[in-house]
Image (cartoon, rainbow, N blue to C red):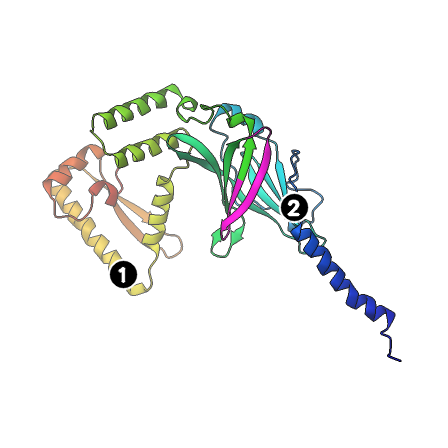
C-alpha cells in the first residue's frame, strides 16, 4: 500500500494550486468598471501612514471650459484585475492594489498639471509629477470623449510609467464644448485675433504662430510656463562642472567677458553698477554688471565682438 501524505502537507500543496486556478479565472474574467464617484483617491485615513499618498506637488488651479468645473471634487474608479484606478478631475490619478499583501501598492500616477491642446481644442488633461519610476516620475494623459454618463472607461500604459486614461462624459458632447477661444478673457481673445491676422498677412510663420499661441495659453493658465523651467535648468547646467579645472576655466572666461563689457561701457560713457554676490559657504564673491535696459541697444550696436547677447549674458537692472 502506498504511503499517504500527511494531511497538513497535502493541504499545503493543494492550496497554491487552488490559488493559481482562482487567479487565472480572475485574470481571464471581464474587467469591471466602477462608475460611482468616491473619495478614495484623496488620502484614505484608514491606510497606514507608509501607504498614504504623498504628493510631490500641488495641483494646478482649475482652468479650461467652465462647464467642466462641476467635475472638481469628484473621483471616478476603474477596476482591472487586482488594481483599482481613480481619476479625480483637476486633482490627481491614483492606483490602488486591492490585495491583502503587507506591501500592497497605493500610489499617485499623476497630479493635475495642464491641458493638452490640439488645433485650438482641448483634447485631454495632463497629470504629471506622480510617484518616482526609475529615473522619472509617473504621468498620465486623460482623454475626454463624449459619453452618456461620467465614467472612467479605459486605462492603459502605452509606455513605461506613462499612462493613458479615457474618460467619458456628456459634458463634452456638444461640438463647441472643448473650444479654447471662448474660455479666454477678452484681453487674450483680442491678442489671439491679432496673432491670427499676422498669420493671414504672412507676417509670421506657422512655427511663430504656434509659439505665440503657446505664450497666450500660458497667460491664460491653460499651459504651464516653460520659460521658468528652462531658466532654472540653464542655471543648473551652468553650475555643473566635472572638475575644479573646468570650473576655474569658466570663471576666467566670464571674468574676461565682464572686463570687456566694463571697458566698453566706460568707453561710451554709459553708467553702470557693479553688483557683488557673496557666498556664505566658501566666502567667494561673484561680480556682475547692472545696466539700464534702455542702454543695451547702444552697447550692442557699439561693439559686436562680444559673444552672446548683452541682455541675456548679464543681469540688467
Q: Is residue 314 visible?
A: no
Q: Provide residue 223's location: percent of width, then percent of height.
A: 41, 35
Figure check: 5 above or below 276: below
Identify the element where label 2 is drawn.
Answer: loop
Q: Which residues are magenta?
A: 147-165
Identify the element where label 1 is drawn.
Answer: helix
Quarter of the image for residue 300 reads top left
Q: Residue at x 21, y 25 (%)?
A: 201
Q: Quadrant of the C terminus?
A: top left
Relative horizontal placement of residue 210, taking residue 143 as reference (left or right): left
22 magenta-colored: no
Residue placed most toward the observer, 217 or 229: 217
* Disc sitting over residue 30 in the figure: 2
Q: Nearer the viewer, mark 1 or mark 2?
A: 2
Residue placed most toward the observer, 66 or 56: 66
Q: Quadrant of the N terminus?
A: bottom right
Q: Is residue 286 visible?
A: yes
Amino acid at each position: 500500500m502506498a504511503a499517504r501524505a500527511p494531511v497538513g502537507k497535502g493541504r499545503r500543496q493543494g492550496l497554491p494550486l487552488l490559488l493559481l486556478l482562482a487567479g487565472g479565472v480572475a485574470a481571464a474574467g471581464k474587467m469591471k468598471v466602477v462608475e460611482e464617484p468616491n473619495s478614495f483617491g484623496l488620502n484614505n485615513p484608514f491606510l497606514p501612514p507608509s501607504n498614504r499618498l504623498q504628493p510631490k506637488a500641488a495641483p494646478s488651479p482649475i482652468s479650461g471650459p467652465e462647464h467642466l468645473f462641476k467635475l472638481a471634487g469628484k473621483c471616478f474608479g476603474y477596476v482591472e484585475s487586482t488594481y483599482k484606478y481613480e481619476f479625480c478631475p483637476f486633482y490627481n490619478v491614483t492606483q490602488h492594489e486591492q490585495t491583502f499583501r503587507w506591501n500592497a501598492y497605493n500610489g499617485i500616477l499623476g497630479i493635475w498639471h495642464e491641458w493638452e491642446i490640439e488645433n485650438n481644442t482641448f483634447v485631454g488633461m495632463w497629470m504629471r509629477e506622480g510617484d518616482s519610476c526609475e529615473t522619472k516620475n509617473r504621468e498620465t494623459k486623460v482623454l475626454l470623449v463624449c459619453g452618456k454618463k461620467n465614467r472612467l472607461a479605459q486605462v492603459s500604459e502605452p509606455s513605461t510609467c506613462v499612462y493613458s486614461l479615457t474618460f467619458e462624459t456628456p459634458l463634452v458632447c456638444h461640438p463647441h464644448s472643448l473650444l479654447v477661444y471662448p474660455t479666454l478673457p477678452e484681453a487674450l481673445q483680442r491678442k489671439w485675433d491679432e496673432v491670427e491676422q499676422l498669420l493671414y498677412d504672412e507676417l509670421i510663420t506657422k512655427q511663430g504662430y504656434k509659439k505665440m499661441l503657446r505664450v497666450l495659453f500660458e497667460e491664460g493658465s491653460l499651459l504651464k510656463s516653460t520659460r521658468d523651467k528652462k531658466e532654472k535648468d540653464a542655471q543648473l547646467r551652468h553650475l555643473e562642472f566635472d572638475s575644479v579645472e573646468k570650473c576655474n576655466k569658466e570663471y576666467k572666461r566670464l571674468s574676461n567677458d565682464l572686463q570687456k563689457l566694463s571697458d566698453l561701457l566706460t568707453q561710451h560713457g554709459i553708467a553702470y553698477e557693479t553688483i557683488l554676490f557673496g557666498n556664505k559657504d566658501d566666502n567667494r564673491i561673484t561680480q556682475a554688471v547692472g545696466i539700464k535696459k534702455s542702454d543695451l541697444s547702444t552697447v550692442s550696436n557699439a561693439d559686436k565682438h562680444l559673444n552672446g547677447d548683452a541682455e541675456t549674458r548679464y543681469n540688467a537692472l
